[in-house]
Image (cartoon, rainbow, N blue to C red):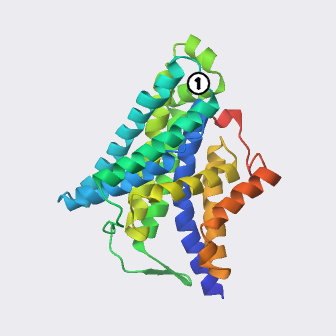
Amino acid sequence: MDDAWLQYVAGGLNAGAIYALVALGFTIVYNASHAINFAQGEFVMIGGMGAVSLVALGLPLWLAVPLAVAGSVIVGVLVQRLALERAQSGGQADVVTLIIITIGVALFLRGLAQLVWDKRIHSLPAFSGSEPIPIGGATVLPQSLWVLGGAAVAVLALGWFFNRTLYGKAMRATAINPLAARLMGISTRGVMRTSFALAAALGALGGVLTAPITFTSTDIGVMLGLKGFAAAMLGGLGSFGGAVAGGLLLGLIEGLGAGFISSAYKDAIAFVVILAVLFFLPGGLVGARRSDRV
């Protein structure tokens, strides 16, 4: 039983790290625009499918991965520039309108991806072998360590960017008071573009890290996006620490639930979490703090 617990926890942390990356993307865009970007899951898909395509073309994995992430960043900036910025330029777009636009963008990106690629499931080679590694009473794949390590590096890099760099602090100031930020000469449009670029990079990173384990397809963005949103809600929408904590906790709940109850209910757990948070803990575990806003 102890070994089973450890195995379920290890699997849950692996999934939770991906959910945390997606949740961070939701949080960054939410703090910049106060809207929920339901196209966030599609950045995960673009990153994974892009890396698979580049490897199939003969590029080495070490080059295909950053190029796939860069491609997703370009898509994220284009989404903000061509869809959201145009809607906001007239000053008439409210939050609900922006959310509806992101849903439409998600549907468009998924349909376009199915035309560019196909609906089949694809795999990406593991970064450093596939021989399981025994850790305590559990065994983990080397790729799982890449997932956890990549997520940790991304979180630390974001913390450094927002707390140590001038532009990161400008982004936080814009979220706290956009009008005051504009009066101080900060480009709020630039902040929005950077927010979408960072969100797309985080999503794509999650896509390429998890592709060797769970595989990838043009349809994975829907469920991963919903689970990332559930993680952001669980931790507290608008909180960076809450997004990370919510992602890891959701992964653990999902892993233990699938192990001790039934794997058939694995995907339903995220929806149960969303309903539970809305009914009993609207602010999430941490709650949104204005000082955390990007």
Q: Amino acid at mark 1?
A: Ala
Q: Give residue 75's position: percent from left, percent from top.
A: 37, 39
Can you name the residue that lies furthest to the left here?
58
Q: Give residue 247's position: percent from left, percent from top.
A: 61, 57
Q: In the rendered image, is residue 294 in sight?
A: no
User: Is 223 rendered above or below residue 252?
Assistant: above
- Image quadrant in which you'd find residue 108: top left
Q: Which residue is disc 1 drawn over?
A: 93
Can you name the residue that lies furthest to the right here?
280
User: Is 224 rendered above or below residue 215?
Assistant: above
> Could you tell me which secondary element the residue under label 1 belongs to?
loop
**Is residue 185 left or right of 73 when viewed as pictured?**
right
Can you name the residue that lies furthest to the bottom here?
1
Quadrant of the image containing the C terminus: top right
Q: Is residue 40 or residue 61 the one in the foreground?
A: 40
Q: Is residue 161 or residue 49 the one in the foreground?
A: 49
Number of numbered labels in the structure image: 1
Residue in the image at 47% along x and 45% along y? 106
Residue in the image at 29% along x and 60% along y? 52
Residue in the image at 59% along x and 67% along y? 267
